[in-house]
Amino acid sequence: MLRSLLGWELERSFEVSPEWKELQKRLQERKRIIDLGCGANPHPRSMVVVDRFVEPVQRPLGNGPEIKVEDFRKLGCLFV
């Protein structure tokens, strides 16, 4: 649909790579996940989340939502 809206012809299909499939498989097998560079959207099964840039001004483009530690606590995640 996006292709027809923009008038683009895609040169290749968007098949999922074997590496991505393997990563998803490994994530499903893990009991504990640490999400590095989580931003405001941590992995749903992460127990610990890490991000250096809490304020939008600290990020390279200077935008995006502010990271609120309280929101992570509500999800049961430890923010570092």
Image (tube, rainbow, N blue to C red):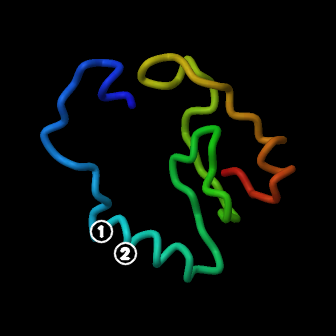
Q: Position of residue 42 (x, y in %)?
A: 63, 50
Disc 2 residue crowd, few under 14, some 14–19, many 20+, Cα 10 Å = few
Quarter of image, res 4:
top left
Question: What amino acid is labelled 1 in the image?
Answer: Glu
| Disc 1 target residue | 19
- 70 to 30, vertically: above or below: above
Residue drawn at 37 percent across, 75 percent down: 22
Q: Position of residue 45 (x, y in %)?
A: 67, 65
Residue drawn at 35 percent across, 65 percent down: 20
Q: How many marks?
A: 2
Q: Secondary structure at mark 2?
A: helix
Kindly report the distance in space between the C-alpha atoms of the residues bearing marks 1 and 2. Answer: 5 Å
Question: What amino acid is labelled 2 in the image?
Answer: Glu
Residue drawn at 64 percent across, 38 percent down: 40
Q: Position of residue 34 (x, y in %)?
A: 58, 64
Quarter of image, res 57:
top right
Q: Position of residue 13 (x, y in %)?
A: 22, 49
Quadrant where the N terminus lies? Answer: top left
- 79 to 31, vertically: above or below: above
- 41 to 43, vertically: above or below: above
Q: Are marks 1 and 2 in contact (CB under 8 Å)?
A: yes
Q: Nearer the viewer, residue 14 or 40?
A: 14
Residue 22: mark: 2
